[in-house]
Image (spheres, rainbow, N blue to C red):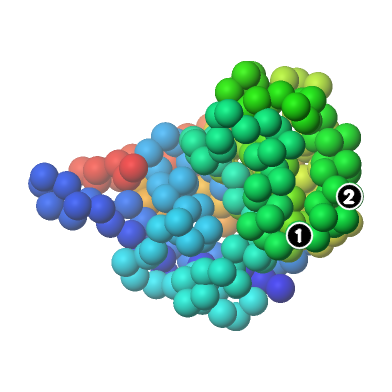
Amino acid sequence: MDLVVSHAFKQFPSSAGPKKILKDISFRVTAGEVVCLLGPNGSGKTTLLKTIATLLSPDGGEVLLDGKSVHSDTLRTRRLLGFASSEEHSFYGRLTVWGNLRFYAQLHALSPARWKARYDELKNVLDLPAPETPFRQLSAGQKQKLLLARAVLHDPPVLILDEPSQHLDPAFLARFRTLATEEWGERRKKIVLISTHHLEDALKISDRWLVISEGRLRFDGSVSAVKRADPAFAVDSFFQKLTAPEEGGPRAD
């Protein structure tokens, strides 16, 4: 299985006219790859991930999952894809941890036995809070864990994670890195695309980076290859060069 983004273009209306957010972005991610998507605030990362996850439709180009457009059959896509974003507000505040995840398990048509087995597994792997805890009483970090649990609940072959490490404490962040690289990527051969603002974290999660700035893809490649070619490699200056504003160009949202 592979995920192909081909010449993706997206714009939004504004008082000054259409504002271009994604500008002809193309890349491919194959099964077993863990890829980090990086870029400054407003570079178009979240718009790109939402477009892949069918929450937004592109104004040009296409997104293919296993050779088929993700937007031609969104139900199929959402069976194959797990999405988590820290800016989501789709959990129910009065429902418990158990109740929220059970609701989404039913949406994915998991049998009661399958749901129970997945919950027991995720409870331990993701260190979920007590099942009877109402969602509105959870801390920011606990809510983030629940978002991750919902994304992987139906064990999809594709994971699209937008800032998944936000609010996670250092101890669990180390576990998350292991999950992403060794469990989801290496062992289960999932396609894993993760956006983050933390460069050092990205180095630990993935060797391949996609760097976008002002809606354009500035880099797609192996960071280790860049290190080998440049003995003076420094991650901060490398990133700053890639994301320097284009002269006279507006920043994307």
Q: Nearer the viewer, residue 153 or 131?
A: 131
Neighbourhood count class around disc 1 (C-alpha, 10 Å): few under 14, some 14–19, many 20 upward: some
Under circle 1, the secondary element is loop
The CA distance from mark 2 to mark 1 is 10 Å
- Reading the chain from its start, which is encountered first: label 2 or label 1? 1
User: At x 47% / y 46%, what residue is drawn?
Assistant: 45
- Residue 59 location, quadrant: bottom left
Q: Nearer the viewer, residue 168 or 120?
A: 120
Quarter of image, res 101: top right
Can residue 143 be seen at all in this image of the molecule?
Answer: no
Read off the residue under disc 2. Answer: 117
Does residue 45 sit above or below 6 in this rendering? above
Residue at the spot of label 1: 110
Rendered-image quadrant of the N terminus: bottom right
**SS class of the residue under badge 2?**
helix
Q: Residue 110: image x %, image y %?
A: 76, 59
Q: Amino acid at mark 2?
A: Ala
* Residue 62 point in image, percent of width and height: 44, 72
x 40%, y 58%: residue: 56
Badge 2: residue crowd in 10 Å (few <14, some 14–19, many ≥20) = few
